[in-house]
Image: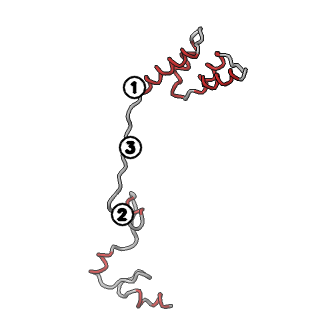
């Protein structure tokens, strides 16, 4: 910001130091909120060099206050297959389990009756 001010001075377009300090204060991020409030409550206004020094101190304070955060992600090695509603509370599956069909004889997956397979089902052939 001070570099841009110096370039404008070389082109005979001066910006007052008070305006430049105000512009810098408004462009600070939200994490500098208490710093801005402190500046506004003081009667005397800062120069550019004072503002830079104070900003460096505030940045150091913010870095020491900042807590380290680690995000952990995991993946399940067993992929889920089929309908995901099975894990819900109160959900009952209407389709019989595969292991139960083998011991009770042939089972039709089309009409869901025992005693024949789908290829022999009269409703499936119709």
The quarter holding residue 79 reads bottom left
Q: Nearer the viewer, mark 1 or mark 3?
A: 1
Q: Is residue 44 left or right of residue 86?
A: right
Who's the residue at 38% across and 37% down the image?
69
Residue at the top extreme? Answer: 43
Who's the residue at 29% across and 81% down the image?
104
Q: State if disc 1 and disc 2 touch (CB < 8 Å).
A: no
Q: Is residue 117 left or right of residue 56?
A: left
The quarter holding residue 61 reads top left
Q: Of label 1 and label 3, which has the lower sequence position?
A: 1
Q: Of label 2 and label 1, which has the lower sequence position?
A: 1
Residue at the front extreme? Answer: 10
**Tag 1 residue:** 64
- Rendered location of residue 56, percent (x, y): 48, 21
Q: Considering the numbered disc 3 on the image, is that residue within a helix, a strand or a loop?
A: loop
Q: Residues within 10 Å of mark 2 (few under 14, many from 20)?
A: few
**What's the distance in space between the residues labelled 2 and 3, CA to CA?**
23 Å
Q: State if disc 3 and disc 1 touch (CB < 8 Å).
A: no
Along the viewing direction, whichever of 5 and 100 lies nearer the viewer:
5
Along the viewing direction, whichever of 52 and 115 lies nearer the viewer:
52
Q: Of label 2 and label 3, which has the lower sequence position?
A: 3
Q: Considering the numbered disc 2 on the image, is that residue within a helix, a strand or a loop?
A: loop
**Tag 2 residue:** 79
Residue at the left extreme? Answer: 103
The quarter holding residue 80 reads bottom left
Q: Which mark is residue 71?
A: 3
- Rendered location of residue 120, percent (x, y): 41, 91
Who's the residue at 71% across and 23% down the image?
11
């Amino acid at each position: 910001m001070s570099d841009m001010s110096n370039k404008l001075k070389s082109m005979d377009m001066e910006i007052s130091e008070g305006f430049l300090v105000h512009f810098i204060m408004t462009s600070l991020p939200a994490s500098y909120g208490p710093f801005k409030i402190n500046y506004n409550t003081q009667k005397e206004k800062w120069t550019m060099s004072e503002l830079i020094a104070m900003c460096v101190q505030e940045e150091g304070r913010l870095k020491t206050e900042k807590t380290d955060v680690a995000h952990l992600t995991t993946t399940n090695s067993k992929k889920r297959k089929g309908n995901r509603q099975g894990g819900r509370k109160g959900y009952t599956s209407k389709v019989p389990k595969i292991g139960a069909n083998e011991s009770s004889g042939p089972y039709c997956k089309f009409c869901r009756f025992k005693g024949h397979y789908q290829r022999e089902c009269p409703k499936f052939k119709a």
